[in-house]
């Protein structure tokens, strides 16, 4: 039975055009949503950020800002802060900036931090990339429930949808529901398929409610390694870009785990190839640096 309303949510695309195209094709073919929303981190880490932004502009879907959108839109401006002002430490981020048009960078700068969604007769929803006021930290299944409840205590919406963690989530805390579709572009749950979420508005004995469905879509990841090379991203970023490519291909959190490890190393690391080699000597699946 067709729901009263169907909404779709896509997040953490990270410039992965084949993953986005697969998710959009599945969305169009099987879901016919009434509205689609984006959860931020549209760009960076895969070599198609400009093409991703072109596709999303054609669709006109509302989006909030992710931490990658925020940083890239502020590179080379007085708003950028350490350590993101070090190109040697974030070569892919600067490569992405170099390959976006000025209008695309401006549109990233204008994205809102949060977005309320209100439809007549439906429980209201709020979109945030991570935690309130902090898109660099997300809601995880293992987070302390009381701590999460306190951080969201000022909000009245019963449903929150976020991204950032790249991991699917459906969690109830203190009468509120927290959802995360997982990542379109770089999943961190060991499943490299493109992830997205739909919510169906259904009638029930206690009134209308949202019914979530998590979608995981196969696509041809064999196209990705050649694009990293032909685009020049590998030449620019070398081993760091290789870590991001690993994440695309196997759905493991190499991309962020290395960044977490690096941020806790003493001093400035100019030799990224050496840093990646040192990291890979200790960390990987089942023994990640991130806690």
Image (cartoon, rainbow, N blue to C red):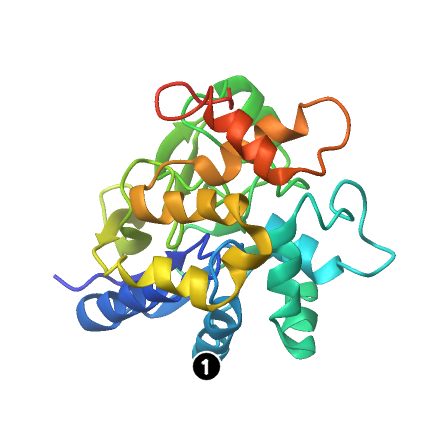
- Side of 198 where 218 appears, left or right: left
Q: Residue 98's quadrant in the figure?
A: bottom right
Q: Is residue 265 above or below residue 235?
A: above
Q: Nearer the viewer, residue 34 or 241?
A: 241
Give the class, few, some or many, for how many residues have Cα within 10 Å of label 1's Cα (few <14, many ≥20).
few
Q: Is residue 147 above or below residue 232?
A: above
Q: Name the residue: 59% across, 57% down.
A: 236
Tell which residue pokes out farthest to the bottom in this image.
58
Specify whether residue 114 is in view.
no
Q: Residue 175, position in %: x, y?
A: 43, 30
Q: Residue 219, position in %: x, y?
A: 23, 60
- Side of 270 where 214 appears, left or right: left
Q: Name the residue: 36% across, 49% down.
A: 248
Q: Is residue 11 above or below residue 62?
A: above
Q: Name the residue: 72% across, 51% down.
A: 87
Q: Residue 245, position in %: x, y?
A: 41, 49
Q: Nearer the viewer, residue 109 or 128?
A: 109
Q: How many marks?
A: 1
Q: Name the residue: 23% across, 61% down.
A: 220
Q: Nearer the viewer, residue 172 or 291?
A: 291
- Side of 7 where 164 appears, left or right: right
Quarter holding the N terminus? bottom left
- Side of 98 where 24 appears, left or right: left
Tell which residue pokes out farthest to the right in this image.
78
Q: Residue 35's quadrant in the figure?
A: bottom left
Tell which residue pokes out farthest to the left in this image.
1
Residue at image mark 1: 58
Q: Callout 1: helix, strand or loop? A: helix
Specify whether residue 135 is in view.
yes
Q: Residue 16, position in %: x, y?
A: 41, 61
């Amino acid at each position: 039975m067709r729901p009263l309303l169907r909404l779709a949510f896509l997040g953490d695309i990270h410039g992965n055009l084949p993953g986005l195209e697969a998710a959009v094709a599945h969305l169009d073919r099987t879901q016919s949503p009434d509205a689609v929303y984006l959860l931020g981190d549209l760009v960076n880490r895969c070599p198609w950020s400009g093409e991703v932004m072109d596709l999303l502009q054609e669709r006109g879907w509302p989006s909030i800002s992710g931490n990658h959108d925020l940083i890239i839109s502020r590179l080379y401006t007085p708003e950028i802060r350490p350590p993101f002002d070090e190109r040697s430490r974030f070569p892919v981020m600067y490569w992405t900036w170099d390959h976006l048009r000025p209008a695309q960078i401006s549109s990233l700068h204008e994205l809102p931090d949060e977005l309320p969604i209100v439809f007549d007769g439906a429980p209201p929803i709020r979109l945030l990339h991570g935690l309130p006021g902090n898109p660099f930290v997300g809601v995880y299944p293992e987070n302390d429930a009381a701590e999460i409840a306190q951080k969201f205590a000022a909000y009245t919406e019963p449903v929150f949808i976020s991204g950032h963690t790249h991991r699917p989530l459906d969690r109830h805390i203190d009468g509120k529901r927290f959802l995360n579709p997982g990542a379109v572009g770089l999943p961190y749950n060991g499943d490299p398929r493109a992830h997205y979420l739909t919510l169906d508005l259904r009638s029930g004995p206690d009134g209308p409610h949202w019914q979530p469905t998590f979608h995981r879509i196969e696509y041809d990841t064999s196209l990705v390694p050649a694009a990293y090379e032909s685009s020049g991203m590998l030449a620019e970023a070398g081993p760091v870009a290789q870590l991001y490519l690993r994440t695309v291909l196997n759905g493991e959190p190499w991309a962020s785990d290395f960044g977490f490890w690096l941020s806790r190393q003493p001093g400035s690391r100019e030799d990224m190839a050496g840093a990646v080699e040192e990291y890979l000597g200790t960390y990987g699946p089942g023994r990640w640096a991130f806690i």
